[in-house]
Amino acid sequence: MRRPAAVIGLFLVCCTAACTLRRQVAPASPYCRGGNPLAGVYHPSRLRVKSRCRVVVGTVSKVVFEPYDGDVHIDLRPDDPSLLSSGNDRVGGNLVVELIPFDRARVAVPEEGARVEVVGPWVEDDQHGWNEIHPAWWISAGRIEPASAAELRAVQLLLQTNASDSS
């Protein structure tokens, strides 16, 4: 009689501990988003999500506004080099951070040399062979530079064309 009671007691203790541990897991950042982490990204099929939401701290090496897809490309020297792959050597050993046009009205564009925290999906770009944060959902410093109506129309057309090509 004691043995079944001990087993049941141990089971209940383990269940309680497991439930407590699960409840204490918090998201990496309040800026993490639910849903498709690649929503609004041009050619998302080239990206393999390594982590749905990652917080990265580092120093901005370069900022480039790309006219083709409206993304802002940010080269970030991360404090944690484990976020890089050997392909990141082709971009100066930086982590590529991409800010998509739809988010530019709420996500800051940092200045070169700024120390920032970035939040977004950590992905591997199979086309380029490097790791990225794409899209950036939050950047801790910089200024808001919304995409123009023309940039938003152009990226919307790219996304529609991409969607019809993959159907």
Image (cartoon, rainbow, N blue to C red):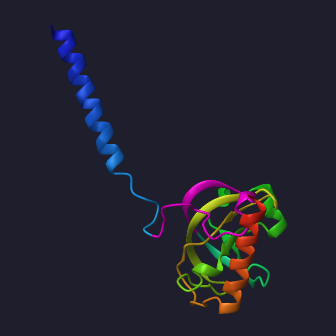
Magenta region: 31-56
User: Residue drawn at (78%, 63%), measured in percent from left and top?
Assistant: 165
Q: Quadrant of residue 160?
A: bottom right
Residue at the (56%, 57%) spot, across then down: 52
* Front in this rendered view, residue 49 or 166: 166
Q: Is residue 39 left or right of residue 86?
A: left
In the image shown, does 47 or 93 lie closer to the viewer?
47
Pinpoint residue 86: horizontal percent, then vertical percent: 80, 56
Q: Is residue 148 visible?
A: no
Examine the rendering and report whether any part of residue 161 can be seen: yes
68 on left or right of 122: right
Q: Position of residue 163 (x, y in %)?
A: 71, 65
What x and y, as percent, mark residue 57? 58, 70
Residue 63 is situated, as x and y percent measured from the top left of the image, at 72, 83
Q: What residue sits 25% from the left and 17% below the top?
A: 7
Asked if residue 40 is among those painted magenta in the image, a careful observer would answer yes
Q: How many marks?
A: 0
